[in-house]
Image (cartoon, rainbow, N blue to C red):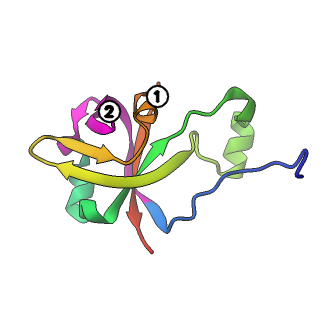
Amino acid sequence: ALGGAAREPLVCQGARPVGPSFSITESDGNVIRALDGMEVTAALEPVLKEFSPAKLMAGVSVPVRPAAALPADAAASAGAPASPYVVRAVLGYSRRESALAVGTNPELLEAPDARLQLHAFSA
């Protein structure tokens, strides 16, 4: 129906990115254990000083197939992120266990170059 038309997915969940984007360096199922080589608690501490985990959602990077990827100059000019994110619920956070449970498929967390970007719920 839209043959030849460019399509671009967007997130419209009433969420805005907060804090830095992290590389997911250790996970177990849908539980993230380390970000950027640090324990989850240490990595997220600056963001959690400002936001309660109950007010946050987890943006998890989605691998892009080469056929769907934009050339770097086109992505930059369109303001597109280097990797799209799906925004999912934070199911739980344990400071003691240094663990963040995310409502997503574990395969996304284990993908090469997987990233986490926290989002503040704003709706």
Name the secondary structure under disc 1.
Answer: loop
- In the displayed structure, would residue 95 be above or below residue 10? above
Query: Residue 57, position in %: x, y?
Result: 38, 57
- Can residue 51 be seen from the camera position used here? no
Residue, x 38% and y 48% (percent of image)?
103
Numbered label attached to residue 88:
none
Numbered label attached to residue 113:
1
Query: Residue 5, position in %: x, y?
Result: 87, 49
- Can residue 53 be seen from the camera position used here? yes
User: Is residue 119 inside the magenta stretch?
Assistant: no
Figure disc tally: 2
Residue, x 41% and y 48% (percent of image)?
117
Residue, x 40% and y 67% (percent of image)?
121
Name the secondary structure under disc 2.
Answer: loop
Magenta residue span: 17-42
- In the displayed structure, would residue 31 be above or below residue 77? above
Residue, x 58% and y 46% (percent of image)?
81
Numbered label attached to residue 29:
2
Q: Is residue 31 left or right of residue 16?
A: left
Main secondary structure found in the magenta portion: strand
Query: Residue 7, position in %: x, y?
Result: 77, 50
Name which quarter of the figure residue 34 lies in: top left
Amino acid type indicated by mark 2:
Gly
Q: Is residue 107 left or right of residue 51?
A: right
Q: Is the Cβ of the residue at disc 1 closer than 8 Å to that at disc 2?
A: no
Q: In this view, does 65 lie to the left or right of 52?
A: right
Q: In this view, does 54 lie to the left or right of 120?
A: left
Amino acid type indicated by mark 1:
Asp
Query: Residue 63, position in %: x, y?
Result: 56, 33
Residue at the far left in the pictured view: 96
